[in-house]
Image (cartoon, helix red, strand yellow):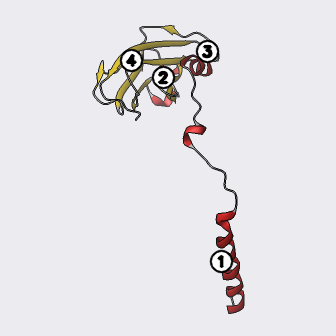
């Protein structure tokens, strides 16, 4: 690169930087991107309108009282062979977005088990929904009392 080309490129870059604050920039808001939806809407999106059935085959382990709603440990185990379980979904019914997380399984997982931490805004029910290969859904729920809110 010769000196003249370098100076031209520097001038062009300077001009772009100088006018860039006046260019319209789309404003992105995380809250605007996250649409508040009801528990029923989120459940319908997961199950495609099918009704999950409560079952003792889904074991949901979570504390009855969570001292801090920002980090609530949740464990889910499905008492079914791994080849029968397609996914595990965790929902919290009173959160801004009730659909907390989903894990999609394969036979390489070994067994249908999942552990994580979720955020709870206040005292509410937690649901563990297992999606089976045949298209049906089984679930368990647990009420968790939160003493310190996790979402604000």
Q: Of 66 and 76, which appears nearest the observer?
A: 66
Q: Of discs 1 and 2, which sits in the foreground?
A: 1
Residue at label 2?
91
- Residue 14 — which label? 1
Q: Of discs 4 and 1, which sits in the foreground?
A: 1
How many other residues sit within 10 Å of disc 2, few (<14), some (14-19) or many (≥20)? many
Q: Of discs 2 and 4, which sits in the foreground?
A: 2
The answer, for residue 8, to whether it is visible in the render is yes
| Rendered-image quadrant of the N terminus | bottom right
134 displayed left or right of 65: right
What whole-number distance in Å separates the C-alpha atoms at marks 2 and 3? 19 Å
What whole-number distance in Å separates the C-alpha atoms at marks 4 and 3? 21 Å
Q: Earlier in the sequence, mark 4 or mark 1?
A: 1
The reply to whether the C-beta atoms of the residues labelled 1 and 2 are less than 8 Å apart is no
Q: Earlier in the sequence, mark 2 or mark 3?
A: 2
Residue 120 location, quadrant = top left
User: Which percent across, then down, holds residue 59?
Assistant: 39, 15
How many other residues sit within 10 Å of disc 1, few (<14), some (14-19) or many (≥20)? few
How many other residues sit within 10 Å of disc 4, few (<14), some (14-19) or many (≥20)? many
- Residue 60 — which label? 4
Per the image, label 2 sits on a secondary structure element best described as strand
The residue at 48%/21% (across/down) is: 82
Per the image, label 1 sits on a secondary structure element best described as helix
């Amino acid at each position: 690169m010769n000196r003249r080309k370098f100076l031209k490129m520097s001038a062009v870059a300077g001009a772009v930087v100088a006018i860039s604050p006046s260019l319209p920039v789309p404003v992105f808001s995380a809250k605007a991107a996250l649409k508040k939806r009801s528990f029923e809407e989120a459940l319908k999106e997961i199950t495609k309108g099918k009704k999950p059935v409560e079952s003792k085959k889904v074991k949901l382990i979570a504390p009855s009282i969570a001292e801090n709603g920002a980090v609530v440990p949740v464990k889910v185990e499905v008492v079914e062979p791994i080849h029968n379980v397609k996914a595990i979904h965790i929902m919290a019914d009173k959160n801004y977005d009730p659909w907390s997380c989903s894990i999609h399984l394969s036979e390489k997982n070994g067994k249908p088990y999942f552990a994580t931490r979720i955020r709870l805004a206040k005292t509410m029910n937690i649901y563990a929904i297992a999606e089976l290969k045949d298209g049906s859904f089984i679930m368990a729920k647990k009420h968790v009392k939160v003493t310190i809110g996790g979402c604000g």
